[in-house]
Amino acid sequence: MTIAIIGAGVAGLSAARELRANGIDVRLFDKSRGVSGRMSTRYAGAWEFDHGAQYLTVQDEDFRAEIDRTIEAGSCAPWAARALYLKTGELSSDTGRDRYVGTPRMNSLPKFWAEGLNIELSRRVSKVTRGETWTLEFEDGSVETGFDGVISTLPPAQAQLVLPDDFKQMETVKSAEMNVCFTLMIGLNAPVDPGWDTLRVKDLPIDWISMNHAKPGRSQDVGTVVVTSEPDWSNTHQDADREWVQDVMLKSASALIGMPLQDSPHLALHRWLYASNKTSPDVDCLIGDGIVACGDWCLGGRVQGAWLSGRAAARVFV
């Protein structure tokens, strides 16, 4: 048996590792130049930004065992961040579950999970069809065929375009929605310390600021600040002028950090079209006849959801 997996983010890597552990051949295809999906890192000269997932938390015991394994391997570490929450002008502790990050950067964790897997990058799947076996058609006109099953880890809006029209879970895929998110990356000549490592905020165009350089294993030679936009604001302004979006986010971040950031030596803005869940089917995965759709969006979002959903999709074929 050979299974094709579309996407080499956390869900795809989790599915691939589970299949391989059960003696099943796997081929992964991803449109990007590297693995990681939204657990990604942006490089710009001396600066490195975790511009996707900021951290992960653990509830599931199997996932906890996996994270413990990655910590032992040096690809992950706990992050005891000084976390604050600003709401209605009042600061309080931003409490919650223990946080973990990839080390020395967020994409170190998916890179660890990708070791030894058969992954083909820069290959965007445009259509999945079925004859005697499953066939993947690619944007560049190439074709790969002979698969006994397919696992899609695409966000729902992309999955609608790629999966067969007769996929029996298509209506559930169509009902799932995801929020847009803008990530502003600010590079400084030296680290800054506003008295906190992360700040969650309410009722502003932004909802999160991270002193990225405060994470374990990050360079202390420069300062790296990551700012993410509030979901409703992002959805409303997803097609707005990027310079305007950046300026709005910069003004909010400057006021909260207490220093002007407009003239920082490095500024970059990234738009994630499929960043977090707006609506979710809240199931492990969506099972069809020989094809399965999965991803963090199936289980309400977050890294743990992606890992569990990918594993569940793999077990359909085991």
Image: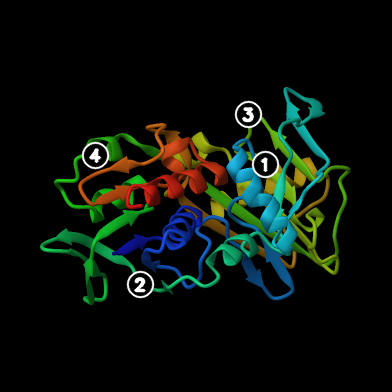
**Which is nearer the N-term, disc 2 or disc 3?**
2
Residue 133 lies in what quarter of the image?
bottom left
**Could you tell me if the residues under marks 1 and 2 are in contact, i.e. CB atoms within 8 Å?**
no
Residue under circle 4?
Answer: 169
**Could you tell me if the residues under marks 3 and 4 are in contact, i.e. CB atoms within 8 Å?**
no
| Amino acid at circle 1 | Trp
**Separation of disc 1 and disc 2 at Cα?**
33 Å
**Separation of disc 4 and disc 1 at Cα?**
35 Å
| Amino acid at circle 4 | Gln
Residue under circle 1?
Answer: 208
**Which is nearer the N-term, disc 3 or disc 4?**
4
In the displayed structure, would residue 114 be above or below residue 150? Answer: below
Q: Residue at x 73, y 64 (%)?
A: 104
Between 153 and 225, the one nearer to me in the picture: 153
Residue 95 percent location from the top left of the image: 76, 30
Residue under circle 3?
Answer: 203
Residue under circle 2?
Answer: 123
In the displayed structure, would residue 12 be above or below residue 195? Answer: below
Between 298 and 92, the one nearer to me in the picture: 298
Quadrant in which the N terminus is drawn: bottom left
Secondary structure state at the residue bearing disc 2: loop
